[in-house]
Amino acid sequence: MARVVVLGAGISGHTAALHLRRLLGKEHEVVVVSPNSKWNWIPSNIWVGVGKMSTEQVTFPLAPIYKRKGIVFHQALGIELHPEGSSENPHPYVSVRYTDPSREGQVADLEYDYLINATGPKLNFAATPGLGPDANTVSVCTAGHAVEASKALSAVIEKMKKGERQSLVVGVGHGTCTCEGAAFEYTFNVEHELRAAGVRDMADLTYLTNEYELGDFGVGGMTFSQGGLETSSKLWTESLFRERGVKAILQSHVEKIEPGEIFYEQLDGSKNKLAFDFAMLLPPFRGADMKAFNQAGEDVTADVFAPNGFMRVDADYTAKPYDEWRAADWPHTYESAHYPNVFGVGIAFAPPHPISRPRTSPNGTVISPAPPRTGMPSGVMGKTVAMTIVSRIKLGTSSAPHRASMADMGASCVASAGTGLLHGSAAAMTMYPIVPDYEKYPTGRSQKDTFGEIGLAGHWIKFMLHFLFIYKAKARPFWHLIPE
Amino acid sequence: MDNAEASIASAPLPTPGTLRRRNNIIFQLWRFIALNVRMASMILKGDH
């Protein structure tokens, strides 16, 4: 009998757990550890953030799903990894601290035969003084945050209706943030709501980003083929900004935020200020800050995890300049660099380096996006690692791992630009591969499979995906036929 | 006018025809199908 423990019940971890349970016999145990009692379809938090959806529409309790599927669930936070066991117990285990109200704060050790670290991002608001819902800005990273963002947005809309001009800023709150796509989405959903409320002319709306140019999205931009010509995602995105009258401040690192004022540095080293009445700025991410110990009890955290808290896997972490980055640097199997029965997936694995060109200001400030690990690749990684573990349990530990490199995988990103069954729109983008491979493709990506299109159809697709992925996550009949 | 502002100001705007097509139900129904097919074929292509 094998026990597989999955840390995290986001897109990656929950997907892994469901596939494991589906493919393994009942004699094997699948355990999920998550500090959250609910699953959240994060892509729709944007719509909660503009008041178009409720938290109930984007979340559901995990416990009933896991009970129905025969998955053991611990509402707890993983705090320590003991991949070699300890001097008292040779079996690998993970220490967890319960967040379940009935045993909050209690610590337990869960032994495992295989462990999947799918802990996702730690929202590092602390990296920028004054950033975050407990300070001066709103967020859409969680459904709860998004509700507060919606209330703040409604308040400024009311002021504008009374004739008071307002400054709204949406973007990223640190030079190394990722998720620029989400910031872009929220910008245009806000813009859409301002128009719908009849106050667009009373609003100054600014997108504040660490991207070198618009359309970068943390993936170094894309090249689309349109009308028989190659065009850049830069031009395509700038067109939307011009069309909707949204300003942009690029190449920015937010240093601190005081009530009503953002202080930021730009890539040329200049220091600037931006006044705001409403600001939604995403935080940078860290890993979940678990520690790791060897059998002797020595701290091996620095071996197992990168300094940013993400887990080292089968990537090439050799420090090298941008011009020497290769698609092959990226992991394929997501096995821990040190322990073959431990895996890191989704946002929890440590990328070898960014995708976008790294840039630093004359003051030494890093101002370039971290690489995104969006929903689709995260789900694929979760499923892939689940299949590897199933193969090893059924066929033996020498069974070859399944592979899913971001350099051999595409992604679809549907960025909403405003809701409405008849008047909404979204930018539907795909890229193949996610990590550009300049050895295979002149532009880094397949022209045929890399495209972007704005229109009502994109909104319908995003709306459809909302229902499809919640159906899938609830493990309804034939859920596994829905691709990641 | 800074570089970002200048770049946005000179970006091409969608034509009136493009704007109409973006919200035309019949045209967008066709695009819904076409986009889903393209996305599905890209998903199936991946290494997994």
Image (cartoon, coloured by chain):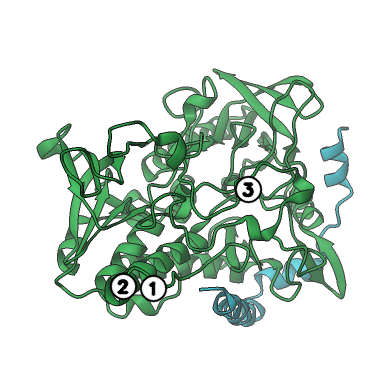
Q: Amino acid at mark 2?
A: Gly
Q: Which residue is mark 3?
A: A184
- Is residue A423 among the parts visible in the rendering? no
Q: Is residue A168 above or below residue A183?
A: above
As drawn, the label of residue A396 is: 2
Which image quadrant for residue A318? top right
Q: Nearer the viewer, residue A149 or A309?
A: A309
Q: Is residue A367 above or below residue A180?
A: above
Horizontal arrangement in the rendering, residue A262 relative to residue A466 (left or right): right
Q: Nearer the viewer, residue A25 or A243?
A: A25
Q: Which residue is mark 1?
A: A399
Alpha carbon distance from label 3 to label 1: 43 Å
The residue shown at (70%, 26%) is A365
The residue shown at (31%, 46%) is A83
Callouts 2 and 1 close, C-beta under 8 Å? yes
Chain A's shade in the image?
green
